[in-house]
Amino acid sequence: MTTINTNIIAVANQKGGVGKTTTVINLATAMAACNKKVLIIDSDPQGNASTGLGLEKTLLKNNFYDVIRGDLSINKSIIKTQIPNLFIIPTSMDLAVIEQEFVNLEKREEKLKKEIEKINMVFDYILIDCPPSLGLLTLNALVASKNLLVPLQVEFYALEGLTQLIETVNHIRNNYNKSLNLQGIVLTMYDKRNKISELVAHDVKNFFNEKVYKTIIPRNVKISEAPSHGMPILMYDISCSGSQAYASLAAEIINQENKLNGES
């Protein structure tokens, strides 16, 4: 059951390799550790959010592809993960063909929104891991969501790609989902030894001001290693800088929401 208090967040960036799925897995884990009930929807055919939580993709028969096609109840696709309070709807590589399958379907951009409305469990957060494109799956996620979270790698062309994403958000606001809000931008893969990282971070903060989170995710080898073990970074090495950063980001987002809701 999605309630008025459920924060549905699309985690999107049309550029690949920016730490999008890593952010979904680790932010969700940190939120769950704060006693928040969290659901991840893996809408990326690559399925990295599923494998990053230790799920074997080939064994997952009830998945997001069947849900969005209308062949399966969304409630039957929700799997409890090894982490308390954290659930996931896994994906399938079959999802890659959904754009072709839905080409003549009316209101195809609302399919995910309508499915989420049927969920009979109560969640504090639903995080949608989007594919690295601005195609139909990302459009569905943005139409279904209250907020957009953008992981942004601190590299030279970072702002260039972000401009296109913001234009897409404005288009969706004007045509499909007027309440879609930019929750925030989280800077990822920051290397304090690299001058470019510092300059790009400065430019992004100047351009987007308070929409950029104070927490910056560092470039950290432990973050890269964790998915190969099927674990979030907070389970793999809770003391490393990557774990501390995602715990800090979760606290920042939860506090941000508490302020908006008038809570202390």
Image: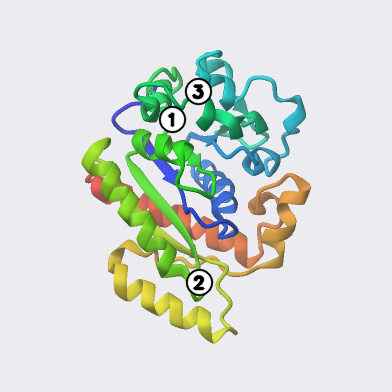
Q: Nearer the viewer, mark 3 or mark 1?
A: 3
Q: Residue at x 31, y 33 (%)?
A: 5
- Is residue 119 left or right of 24 when viewed as pictured? left
Residue on which the image places disc 2: 154
Picture coordinates of residue 23, whole percent (x, y): 54, 53
**Is residue 261 rendered to the left or right of residue 243?**
left
Pointer 3 residue: 68
Quadrant including the N terminus:
top left
Q: Is residue 36 among what the camera can see? A: no
Query: From what the image shows, is residue 93 above or below residue 107?
Result: below
- Looking at the rendered structure, the kind of residue marked 3 is Ile
The relative height of residue 125 versus residue 121 in the rendered view (above or below) is below
Residue at 32% across, 62% down: 211
Foreground: 182 or 241?
182
Q: Which residue is mark 1?
A: 123
Q: Marks 3/1: CA distance?
A: 20 Å
The residue at 66%/57% (across/down) is: 238
Number of numbered discs = 3
115 relative to 100, above or below: above
Mark 3 and mark 2: Cα distance apart in space: 34 Å
Three-letter code for the amino acid on which mark 1 is drawn: Phe
Do labels 3 and 2 touch, CB within 8 Å?
A: no
Residue 98 appears in the figure: yes
Q: Secondary structure at mark 3?
A: helix
